[in-house]
Image (cartoon, grey):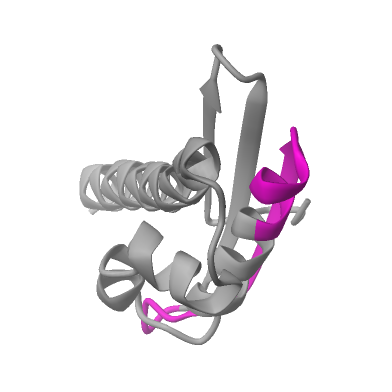
Amino acid sequence: MIKSASGTGKVGNATCGDIMKVYLKIDENEVITQAKVKTFGCAAAIVSSDVAMDLVKGKTVEEALKVTNKDVLDVIGQVPANKIHCSILAQEAIAEAIKDYRKQQAKAQKTKAAKQ
């Protein structure tokens, strides 16, 4: 967990019970400086989410949105077909955290504009 995260995203798969919560710290240049995740689920879910965090650290928000489940699988290697969804969850969690970040940024801009 990151205190004062710039964006958080939570996704889950009710069928298998995997849940991921991503925390991103994003600087003023929109570069992800920290990426942490809490994952509840199988080993494939834990590895997928951990690899995904490594892949987005140091990237801009736009670059991070381009990280796909295939990128995660390229690092992990071959997984059983029924575990591919774990890498998809990791991709979705990143997207949700960035969506939250953008929502917070828009809210801050509105507040700033209202004060001027």
Q: Give the side of residue 96 with respect to residue 16, left or right.
A: left
Q: Residue 108 appears at what percent x and percent y?
A: 36, 49
For the point 54% across and 77% down, the residue is 75
Q: Residue 11 appears at what percent x and percent y?
A: 51, 30
For the point 60% across and 57% down, the residue is 48
Verify whether residue 34 appears in magenta. yes
Vertical placement of residue 113 versus 73, above or below: above
Q: Residue 78 appears at what percent x and percent y?
A: 53, 65
Residue at the top extreme, as displayed: 14
- Which corner quadrant of the image does residue 17 belong to? top right
Q: Give the side of residue 114 with respect to residue 36, left or right.
A: left
Question: If the image is split into quadrants, where does the C terminus sit?
Answer: bottom left
For the point 27% across and 52% down, the residue is 109
Is residue 33 visible in this depiction of the protein?
no
Vertical placement of residue 5 versus 25, above or below: above
Tell me where the magenta segment starts and ends, as one range. 28-47
Between residue 24 and residue 65, name the one nearer to us. Answer: 65
